[in-house]
Amino acid sequence: MAGYSGNANLLASSIQYIINVVMTVPALIWMDKWGRRWPLMLGAFFMMSFMFANAGLMGGTGEVVPGGIGGVPQQSMRVSGAPAKALIACTYLFVASYAISWGPVSWVYPPEVYPMRVRGKAVALATSANWAFNSALGAFVPEAFATIRWKVYVIFGVFNLAMLLHVAFVFPETAGKTLEEVQLIFDDPNGVRYIGTPAWKTKKATKGMQEVERGNVNADKMMVDDEKSGDEEAGTVEVKRG
């Protein structure tokens, strides 16, 4: 739909795959330092922005092609010139935003948030749901481009907005916390009913965990002032000496 074909189309697709792989690496290295909530919220925000930008570009400058480009109904619109380049750029930026946020974090978060008694089944269900919806998207998107055209991007943008709000109000921070500490979030007697500690009040606690892993704890209890080092959650690390 951006007017590319043959080797140019293959090259454009290859660049997208390379971006996906390269942008995943920083998240794998610094995910614990960044936490879980902020990558998810920022990723959702930027993905939403680029989806709405694509909708505007295609809806405002695209030309409807009856029967589809080359007889392919799914390629129902043609965009050329500068808008075509902007469309491709926004698509690349969307992929980069996903690869550094929702791509890796969505696999890490489920095992951290569920208690041990349901962890295995819950993570299996989350993984199954992920692949089920991937299959549904594979069936939906081609037909959607053939019928509602640029409005497909609007639908995806709205879903990304829903993701942003869902994470902001419901997803607690789990980075650096043990499963027991995560359970305390949901069991907080002073928190919201059925939710526990409000998600926006939770902070990452990776510094204390890193100190314990390195063996740099010289007292039975160590207070961690997280706001002075990366806005982490202040907490108490307890070490039992044998």
Image (cartoon, helix red, strand yellow):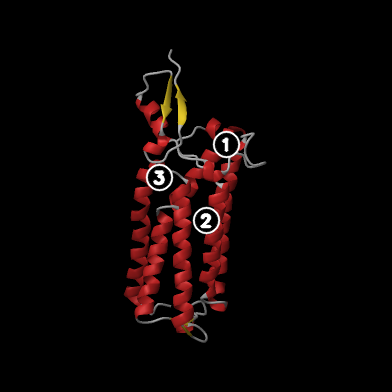
What residue would you read off at disc 1? 185
Closer to the camera in the image, 82 or 38:
38
**Residue drawn at the location 34% of the way across and 49% of the way down:** 26
Where residue 10 is drawn, which disc sits there?
none
Precedes in sequence: disc 3 or disc 2 = 3
Closer to the camera in the image, 135 or 210:
210
Q: 78 left or right of 199?
A: left
Precedes in sequence: disc 3 or disc 1 = 3
Q: Which residue lies furthest to the bottom in this view?
A: 66
Q: Which amino acid does label 1 sit on?
A: Ile
Query: Residue 115's image quarter?
Result: top right
Q: Can residue 172 be seen in this view?
A: no
Q: What is the C-alpha distance between the residues marked 3 and 2? A: 17 Å
Q: Image height check: is 147 above or below 233?
A: below
Q: Which amino acid does label 3 sit on?
A: Trp
**Residue drawn at the location 45% of the way across and 56% of the way down:** 43
Percent coordinates x, y for residue 27 in the rendering: 38, 48
Q: Is mark 2 on a helix, strand or loop?
A: helix
User: Do the CB atoms of the residues marked 2 and 1 lie less than 8 Å apart?
Assistant: no
User: Do the CB atoms of the residues marked 3 and 2 lie less than 8 Å apart?
Assistant: no
Counting other residues with Cα less than 10 Å from the Cα at mark 1, is it few (<14), some (14-19), or many (20 or more)? many
The number of numbered badges drawn on the structure is 3
Q: 32 left or right of 197?
A: left
The N terminus lies in quadrant: bottom left
What residue would you read off at disc 3? 34
What residue would you read off at disc 2? 164
**Residue drawn at the location 43% of the way across and 38% of the way down:** 232
Percent coordinates x, y for residue 191 in the rendering: 62, 39
Precedes in sequence: disc 2 or disc 1 = 2
Q: Is mark 1 on a helix, strand or loop?
A: helix
Q: Is residue 20 visible?
A: yes
Q: What residue type is labelled 2?
A: Leu
